[in-house]
Amino acid sequence: MPYDAIIIGGSYAGLSAAMQLARAGRAISVIDSNAPRNRFAAASHGFFGQDGAAPRAMIAQAREKLLAYPDVHFVNGTAIHAHAIPGGFAIDLGMGDTLQAAKLVLAFGVVDELPDLPGLAGKWGKSVLHCPYCHGYEFKARRLGVLNVMEKSAHQALMIPDWGPTTFFLNGGAMPDAGTLEKLRRRNVSIEPAKIVALEGTEKDLSGVRLEDGRVVDLDAIFTGSRTRMASPIAEQLGCAFDEGLLGPVIRTDAMKMTTVPGVYAAGDIARGMHNATFASADGVMAGTALHQALVFEPLAA
């Protein structure tokens, strides 16, 4: 096999896996389409030693450090198709280009399926937010909202008051049950039942939420738990099993990040319910070290 491992995805999870394998002296290729999920955010927060750093700068720094290892190869492109071959796997890059490796790490990430509201898309990652741990502090004590998009939205609305005064926008959805309403009251969450027609403000900065009845509720940021989907069909092509996570499907893995397909590992947002840069990196470390040990010990057991 030309490579010991191919890593599909070059963000936090993929590069963390790559570092473990590179330091073990293994020949690896990292395929990356240069579209990390957090590319819409100006800064990444809560990551050890990197709080406030720009996501792309963090990725560029990690790539630079990886390139110091002689057996690391980067491919700027997209993995189109994957299939098993004797002794490993083949990855089709399109235009007739194919790579082969003994094992794979899937770290291609997920895509957010955003609510279809005028004015929302341009504000995503800036004043329309997903994770309060990642971005809540930057809006501390300002006017905050939570958009009702799923069953867990009420749970999110109960959390957000720790960062500022919060309005729960039902957006024409059903009123929460009596028990949840009491919890929201105790957390001083205001409830707005009316349907939203648009988000007001500049392209990036939210100033308010316009309701169907013409009212505008002044707001500085709104949180929403977007539904996610796989950014690549590769896991399905390989036959990996999926489970339903909090926000969408996740690839089923064991404690060592092995999928249900032997020799294929998965790390990051595609393989866990809670999405966070630190978790993604930690998953990558586990996948990389587990894959390396498999390369060592599987031949010894034959």
Image: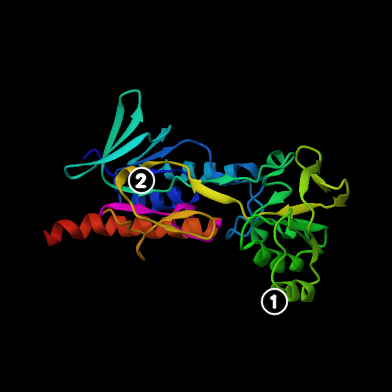
211 vs 48: above or below: above
Residue range corresponding to the magenta coloring: 262-276
Please name the residue shown 76% across and 64% down the image. 163
Which residue does the numbered mark 2 point to in the structure image? 236
Foreground mark, 2 or 1, reads: 1
In front: 80, or 213? 213
| Circle 2 residues within 10 Å: few <14, some 14–19, many ≥20 | few
Residue at mark 2 to residue at mark 1: CA–CA distance:
40 Å
Which colouring convention does the figure follow? rainbow
Identify the image quadrant of residue 118.
top right
89 vs 176: above or below: above
Tell me if 179 is positioned left or right of 186 in this view.
left
Q: Is residue 269 magenta?
A: yes
x and y percentages locating residue 107 in the rendered image: 43, 48
Instruction: Count up the numbered dots.
Output: 2
Please name the residue shown 73% across and 60% down the image. 137
Q: Secondary structure at mark 2?
A: helix
Q: Is residue 161 magenta?
A: no
Tell me if 10 is positioned left or right of 122 in this view.
left
> Is the stretch drawn in magenta largely helix, strand or loop?
loop
- Quarter of the figure that contains the N terminus: top left
Q: Secondary structure at mark 1?
A: helix
- Quarter of the figure that contains the C terminus: bottom left
Q: Residue furthest right?
A: 215
Whether label 2 touches label 1, CB < 8 Å: no
Q: Amino acid at mark 1?
A: Gly
Q: Residue furthest top?
A: 95
Identify the image quadrant of residue 242.
bottom left
Which residue does the numbered mark 1 point to in the structure image? 179
Q: Amino acid at mark 2?
A: Glu
The answer to which of marks 2 and 1 sits earlier in the sequence is 1
